[in-house]
Image (cartoon, rainbow, N blue to C red):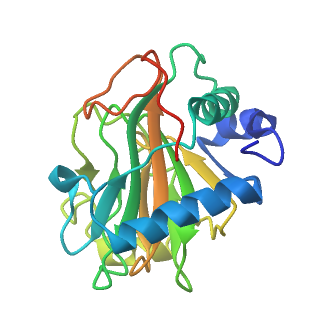
Amino acid sequence: MLFKYEPGSAHKQFNEQGYVHLKDVLADDFVGYIKAFYDETQETASAEAEDWQVYGKKRQYVFEFPSQEAAEEFRDGLAALTGIDRDAFTISERHLKVYDKAANPWPAPHKDRAASEVSIGLPVHLPKGSTVCVFPELQFGPNPEEKALFMTDRDHPDLEQIYQKETCVMLNESIGDLVVFLGSSIFHERVKAAGAAILYIKANGDGRDPLGENIFGQKPMAEAL
């Protein structure tokens, strides 16, 4: 079991807001598995997605579920939460992101690539004060490009104060929580990210897989050792 309770119980809230914070939803064994994966990545870079490193900000490692059954349970739970049809649920990215110790504590918010319609965050290691922030009322709408779209001071001359505005929602998540938001439609960012580690699973419902990381509709993966 990956979840202590059904993520789908928050479908109405997600549908109304475009984001949801599920507290203490991840099963202890699954949290332990993710933490073990994080510990392993710190000892070896064998799983690192070198083409997608963001130097000075974060390093990224391709995540493998403990089994095909676990992956399908995750898919079913998140499909119920987001409203994506389970048979169309496509993973566009599955990376453990480890933020550099020199990461900017207040970076410009961004929207994810178009294929990352839904962003699912599972915190693994959180320094004090580190949180994801979402801006659901600020220029809401899909990013049509297959690259991130960053907020600029040309559009927002007061960009340096953007995190002090009422439109900023700080989720203040903890280990064992799940944060889910419309990643390609809502400006968002992690603040005070230095040293943080977050597993991000990103998904859509129309088969877009720009990184070749979708694991559904394929032959079952081997059981993790």
The x and y percentages for residue 195 are 41, 80
| Camera-side residue of 129 and 51 | 51
Res. 24 visible in picture: yes
Q: Nearer the viewer, residue 153 or 48?
A: 48
Could you say where residue 24 lies in the image, as x and y percent from the top left? 77, 60
Q: Based on the displayed image, in which of its 4 quarters is residue 81 positioned?
A: top right
Residue at 63% in and 29% down: 69
Left/right placement of residue 35 relative to residue 94 reads right
Q: At 53% across and 53% down in the image, what residue appears? A: 121
Q: Is residue 211 left or right of residue 21?
A: left
- Please tell me whether residue 146 is drawn above or below residue 89 in the rendered image: below
In the image, what residue occupies the spot 24% across and 57% down? 155
Q: Residue at x 54, y 65 (%)?
A: 36
**Which residue is at the far front?**
225
- Residue 140 coordinates in the image, percent (x, y): 44, 42
* Quadrant location, the N terminus: top right
**Is 192 rendered above or below residue 14?**
below
Q: Nearer the viewer, residue 72 or 129?
A: 72
Specify whether residue 167 is in view.
no
- State which quadrant residue 23 falls in: bottom right
- Tally of numbered discs: 0
Q: Position of residue 75 (x, y in %)?
A: 60, 30
Q: Quadrant of residue 93?
A: top left
